[in-house]
Amino acid sequence: MSTSATTIFSPETAARFDRLVTLYPVKRSALIPMLLYAQDEIGYISDAVVVEIAQRIGISELDVRSVLSYYSMLRTKPVGKYNVQVCTNISCMLRDGYGIMEHCKKRLGIGHKEVTSDGLFSLEEVECIGACCWAPAVQINYDFYDDLTTEKMDQILDDYKAGRGKETV
Amino acid sequence: MPRLVFHPEEVKIISRRFGQGAADIDKYIALDGYKAVQTAIEKGVDWIIAEMKASGLRGRGGAGFPTGMKWSFVPKQSERPKYVLVNGDESEPGTCKDHVIFLHDPHAVIEGTMIAGLAIGSKMGFIYLRGEYRYLLKIMEKAVADAYAKGFLGKNIFGSGIDFDIVTQTGAGAYEVGEESALMESLEGKRGVPRIKPPFPAVVGLYGGPTVINNAETIASVPHILLMGGEAYAKVGSERNGGTRLFGISGHVVNPGVYELPMGYNLKKAIYEVGGGISNGRKLKAVVPGGSSTPVLTADEIDVGLDFDQMGKAGTMLGSGGIVVIDDQTCMVEFALRTIKFYQHESCGWCIPCREGTDWLKKTIGRVHAGGGVAKDLDNIRYLAENMLGRTFCPLGDAAAMPTIGFIKKFRHEFEDHLNGKPCPYAHAEEPALV
């Protein structure tokens, strides 16, 4: 499938997918990046995403779903516009990662894997994100925040609420 | 943004360009960049392999296999294309060294990949970064595009008549994919479950072709080794452990950070001098010396050199170089629980001893920590962990079992305290919620 009127993706993403499948010795190597970029644009892996990616690569929808269910960053339900991912693994735990998690729960009024009623934030406790020496650390979508305190966390959430947060895609 | 740290005890080889804007290709070139690959082209394959063997460089992912020897195992003649695969799926808790390499010196990864390609006769390399490292992937993508724009990658690199391409790749969240055969599965667009070995990747790897898989730090060390000479590099380190490596000191220290220290550097000095000692005026209780899968050392076991052999003699492993420092106010049962929860979450489920073993370890340690354990639990934890060792396709089962055995062996009294109804001395807000 080439970029055409039938795609559910933006022209930029469709063009990126056209290129991705040509980069590797086999098309299927593009599957995981495509799922992640599709999720970035659509918000989650919908049935329509599965159908189009399966067609683009030339594999079955079942093959796509089998891979999709393996990787923890890929999801089949929407999350908040800003997905707050709090690391509580060992290095963060030792520097009050759980305190940050509890603070976010209270502040946002939601628990692990829940979304605020306005759809702005979701919260998730995650495994090690590779920021151990700057713990405790949080990722909001793809942006890292480290050396956190509850005060810093409040400031960061306030910034996102006011539309001033970083947005790396 | 990760903060850069400096300490006079450091020997800056891999981190020489950190903080100097070397992500910019012109700056990288000005700092001796892309010289090593040109020398490598000029002097040829045998010279590269000889220098790498002389350097004593051992794999920085954790296994510590000699890099030069790994490269020499790839057959010279092959019907299928050969590949270089750079493992930047950095996911071992306590480890964030590749993070700073991708951030500060992305071209060193590219140049190292090219040299590995020359050494094994490959025309294509893949640089795989974990999905969470999106901003670092963008830095790597720009570096690769800049290298193509200069004509350093693509057809006829540096007039050698040799073609070499690099493709960057992203994962999507899976610790298991850091295991080399699972990494290849993931790059082929599949679930990250390990392959049965043999055949080893050097013979049958990516897309069925001979493949060299190296950790990102290993690859980033390569240009520096060729620039300074293998023997000179080896001399910086300890016996059979050439050079330096990036140690990530985290947890309860005054100055956490990623520091470059010679192999064999004393662990106690790393914690008290380089790391600035224990924070909040507390005392040291324990150290997890090389990422979460390495067996714990007690406070009086840390007068030991940080290299593969000395750590092995001390009953633990050098691992990924992630030194996690634990103070005397920490509950080791909770630490053990958080560790096993991670491995239970990340077990891919392919082998039964790992899938079931991590789950039962989590349940049993969890109930001991919650105050509902029974005396037999302590022996059961150890028995179960010991029976996982060596019984799985990939090392994840061992990675879960080894630290667990360490905790129960060295801190059994803390487990017993929980059985005897003493309150947990480490009070965090709530029981870990991960599902």
Image (spheres, coloured by chain):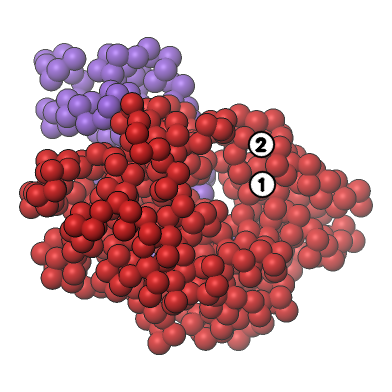
Circle 2 is placed at which residue position? B392
Which chain has been coloured red in this picture?
A: B
For label 1, the residue is B398
Tell me, by letter, which chain the rendering colours purple.
A
Query: Label 1 marks which chain's residue?
Result: B
Residue B368 in the image, given as x and y percentages of width and height:
80, 52
Is B320 on the left-hand or right-hand side of B397? left
* Residue A1, quarter of picture: top left
Q: Quadrant of the N terminus of chain B?
A: bottom left
Q: Badge 2 sits on which subunit?
A: B
Q: Is residue A105 left or right of residue B293?
A: left
Residue found 40% across the figure and 72% down from its top = B231
The residue drawn where x is 71% and y is 75% is B301
Name the spot of residue B201 as percent of width and height, x first.
46, 37
Give the quarter of the image for residue B36.
Answer: bottom left
Q: Tag 1: Cα neighbours inside 10 Å, few (<14), some, or many (≥20)? A: many
Query: Is the C terminus of chain B in the top left, top right, bottom left or bottom right quadrant?
Result: top right
Q: In the figure, is residue B330 to the left or right of B117?
A: right
Tell me the amino acid under the disc marked 2. Answer: Thr
Residue nearest the viewer, comparing B227 with A145: B227
- Label 2 near label 1: C-beta < 8 Å? yes
Which percent across, then down, holds residue A119? Answer: 35, 39
Foreground pick, A137 / B116: B116
Q: Is residue B255 above or below residue B330?
A: below
Q: Nearer the viewer, residue B310 or B360?
A: B310
Q: CA distance from mark 1 to mark 2?
A: 8 Å
